[in-house]
Image: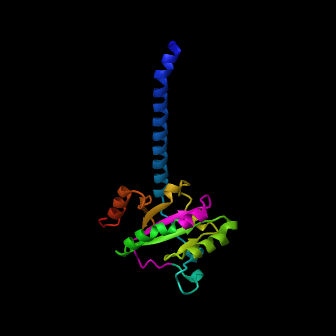
């Protein structure tokens, strides 16, 4: 009887300890990943990637975004571990945010997909079918990952804002959370 009573009291304490350990472990992983991401400038070599821009009337393979000296670049990176068809279906979720951000002329956006070799043609077809209003870069040779080995593998670290020198100044998807959204706009010097 004493053992059952002990288990009833100890089990909640053990569960709470486990939850706290997981919370602090995740928090330290996020901090470690953020430090790694911010440790070096991010290099964008879009000239070494295929550009898909369905709304452009000329050969999109020759088109590469000219950010016109805008002070910030929003990078959304999708690597080969992610579901490419799922990601392309969700691309229109950026439309409203991008039209809002483009009004002030401070931010260029770079969507970079790094598909598996066997998925490259399918990804291109999916992007063309979606008829996006902005360019998407297909990094089939892995140049983005090679040039930026400090970018963590965690997908939550694959959306970030860099300044003109490539320094990461904001991490996270500003569409997902009101606090992140406000912080994003504060970072670019604008009220949300």
Relative to the observer, which residue lies in front, 56 or 129?
A: 129
Q: Based on the displayed image, in which of its 4 quarters is residue 97 positioned? A: bottom left
Q: Position of residue 45 (x, y in %)?
A: 55, 72
* Up-down relation of residue 1 to residue 179 (above or below): above
Whether residue 43 is visible to the viewer of this picture, yes or no, is no
Q: In the rendered structure, does residue 41 fall within the stretch colored magenta? A: no
* Up-down relation of residue 168 to residue 122 (above or below): above
Q: Based on the displayed image, in which of its 4 quarters is residue 119 positioned? A: bottom right
At a point 52% along the width and 15% down the height, the residue shown is 3
Q: In the rendered structure, does residue 81 fall within the stretch colored magenta? A: yes
At a point 56% along the width and 55% down the height, the residue shown is 153
Which residue range is magenta in the image? 65-89
* Up-down relation of residue 181 to residue 121 (above or below): above
Q: Position of residue 40 (x, y in %)?
A: 48, 60
Relative to 12, 180 lies left or right: left
Image quadrant holding the C terminus, namely bottom left
């Amino acid at each position: 009887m004493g053992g059952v009573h002990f288990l009833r009291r100890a089990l909640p304490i053990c569960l709470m300890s486990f939850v706290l350990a997981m919370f602090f472990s995740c928090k330290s992983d996020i901090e470690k990943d953020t430090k790694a991401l911010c440790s070096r400038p991010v290099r964008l070599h879009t000239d070494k990637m295929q550009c898909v821009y369905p709304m452009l009337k000329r050969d999109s393979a020759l088109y590469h975004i000219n950010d016109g000296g805008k002070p910030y670049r929003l990078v959304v990176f999708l690597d080969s571990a992610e579901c490419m068809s799922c990601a392309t279906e969700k691309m229109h979720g950026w439309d409203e945010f991008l039209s809002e951000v483009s009004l002030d002329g401070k931010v260029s956006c770079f969507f970079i997909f790094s598909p598996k070799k066997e998925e490259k043609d399918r990804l291109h077809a999916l992007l063309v079918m979606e008829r996006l209003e902005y360019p998407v870069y297909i990094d089939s040779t892995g140049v983005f990952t090679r040039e930026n080995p400090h970018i963590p593998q965690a997908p939550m670290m694959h959306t970030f804002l860099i300044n003109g020198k490539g320094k990461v100044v904001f991490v996270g998807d500003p569409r997902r959370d009101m606090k992140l959204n406000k912080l994003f706009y504060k970072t670019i010097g604008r009220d949300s």
